[in-house]
Image (cartoon, grey):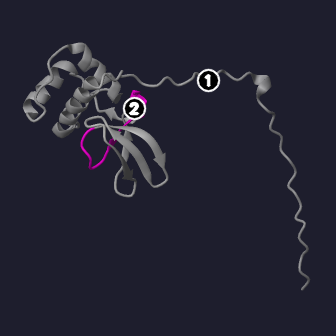
Amino acid sequence: MEYSKLVAVTGLPGLFELINSKTDGAIVRSLDDKSTRFVASRVHNFSHLESIEIYTVRDNVNMVDLFMAMDKAGVALPDEKDAAAVKKYFEKVYPDMDFERVYASDMKKMVKWFAVLKKNEIEIKLTEQPEEEPVAEEDIPEVTEEAPKKSTRKKKAD
């Protein structure tokens, strides 16, 4: 299972693997109980974990950076129900987080998600974007102005 296929679904607890998407929703598999279900996009919104960013005192960072810091810290995860313990945990693990803009409920959710990722042994990394090759000047088409085209419609006589 790849990190790039993981989504959070509004209104549903936990994380899901995106199996297939359709115009009216998606088929997802829960990482908690491995159940597969169809989730309608009219009722729920989907957020790819790769696209979620965290407020920091500097620039926003991708959640992957936070998860990697949590992994490197080696500190035991706090009880996600204790907001004060969760905040103290993140103050140790990721002190650059903007604690005024990141809500306690979001921090609790990040602890839960990290525990699920570790339980399912998912490698936490962003998919690499292929580097664009520089375009040589001779490959750029030359743009020239064309004379305005005359209308082919006949004018109505008065």
Q: Is residue 12 above or below residue 131?
A: below
In 3D space, how far apart are the residues under numbered discs 2 and 1 (Cα atoms)?
20 Å
The amino acid pointed to by label 1 is: Glu
The amino acid pointed to by label 2 is: Glu
In the rendering, which numbered label is found on residue 77? Answer: none
Q: Is residue 21 visible?
A: yes
Residues in magenta, as a range: 1-14
Circles 2 and 1 in contact, beta carbons < 8 Å: no
Measured as percent of width and height from the top left, residue 33 is found at 26, 37
Q: Which SS class for mark 2?
A: helix
> What quarter of the picture does the N terminus occupy?
top left
Q: Is residue 151 above or below residue 10?
A: below
Q: Residue at x 22, y 27 (%)?
A: 115
Residue 106: which quarter of the image?
top left
In-front residue for pair 158/35 = 35
**Relative to residue 25, is residue 58 drawn left or right?**
left
Q: Is residue 7 above or below residue 88?
A: below
Disc 2 crowd rating (10 Å Cα; few below 14, some 14-19, many 20+) is some
**Relative to residue 154, is residue 59 drawn left or right?**
left
Measured as percent of width and height from the top left, residue 64 is found at 34, 25
Foreground mark, 2 or 1? 2
Residue position for label 1: 132
Q: Residue at x 49, y 53 (%)?
A: 23
Q: Residue at x 13, y 29 (%)?
A: 86
In-front residue for pair 139/42 = 42
Q: Is residue 112 above or below residue 71?
A: below
In-front residue for pair 23/138 = 23
| Residue 41 on the magenta segment | no
In the rendering, which numbered label is found on residue 50? Answer: 2
